[in-house]
Image (cartoon, rainbow, N blue to C red):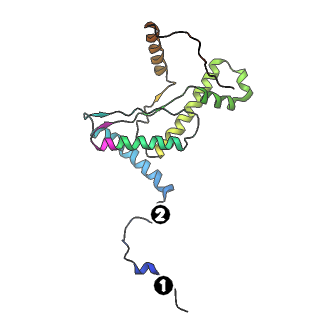
Amino acid sequence: MAEPIDYKKTLRLPETAFPMKANLPQREPELLARWASEKTCEQLLAQNAGKPRFVLHDGPPYANGNIHQGHMLNKVLKDVVVKAKSMEGRLCELVPGWDCHGLPIELQVDKKLGSKKRELTKAQLRDACRAYATEWIDTQRTQFQRLGVFARWERPYLTMSFGYEAAIVRELGKFAARGSLYRGKKPVHWCTH
C-alpha cells in the first residue's frame, strides 16, 4: 500500500519567524509590562503636545461588576478612534471615568450586606457603597488595560470624588439662582426593591 501524500510539501508556503501559536497567556502580560515600562501612552501624548486637540468624552460605566461584552465593544471602539486620531497627529487623551452612584451599586451592596443593612446608619451605608465602587473600579481598570486601551488610568474621574460632587452642587446652585428649578407633578420612577 502506498504511503499517503503529504500535500504540504507540494505547496510553496511563505516562511516566517513568527510563532504558529499566539501564546496569549504568556504574551499578554509581557506586552502590558512593555507598554507600561516604555510609557507608550505617555510618549504618544508627548509626541502630539501642542497639536490640535481631539476630545472624545467617555461615558462612564457603573463600578459594580466585571466588564461585559458591551463594555469591551464600547471601550475598544473608542480606543481605536483615539489611537487613529493620535496617529493623524492630533492630541488625543482618553480620560477614563466611573459612575459610582445610583441604584446599580446600591443594589449590589444591599445583596452583599443582606440583613446587616438594617444595622447600619445612612453614613455607614454610603461608606459601604463607596468601598464597593472602589473595589470594582480597580478591577475594571485592570480589565480595560488588558484590552490594550490607552488611557490616563492613574487619574480617572470618579463621580464619588468629593471635588466632582462639589462641582455638581455648585452647578445645581447656579440653576436655582437662575430660577431654573421648579417643583411639579411628574412621576418619579423608583426601584421596586
Looking at this rendering, what residue extends furthest in the left direction? 50
Q: Secondary structure at mark 2?
A: loop
Query: Residue 153's quadrant in the figure?
Result: top left
> Which residue is rendered at x = 64% and y = 21% of the image?
124
Q: Nearer the viewer, residue 157 or 29?
A: 157
Please identify the quarter of the rendering in which residue 91 is found.
top left
Judge by depth and name the residue closer to the eye, 54 or 178. 178
Tell me if residue 43 can be seen: no
Q: Secondary structure at mark 1?
A: loop
Residue at mark 1: 5
Kindly check if marks 1 and 2 are in contact, taking CB atoms under 8 A apart as contact: no
Magenta-colored stretch includes residue 89: yes
Label 1 CA crowd tier, 10 Å (few <14, some 14–19, many 20+): few
Residue found 31% across the figure and 38% down from its top: 45
The residue drawn where x is 47% and y is 18% is 168
Three-letter code for the amino acid on which mark 1 is drawn: Ile
Please state the horizontal and vertical placement of residue 113, each as a whole percent of the image. 69, 29
The magenta-colored residue range is 84-93
Q: Residues within 10 Å of mark 2 (few under 14, many from 20)?
A: few
Q: Position of residue 49 (x, y in %)?
A: 27, 35
| Residue bearing mark 2 | 21
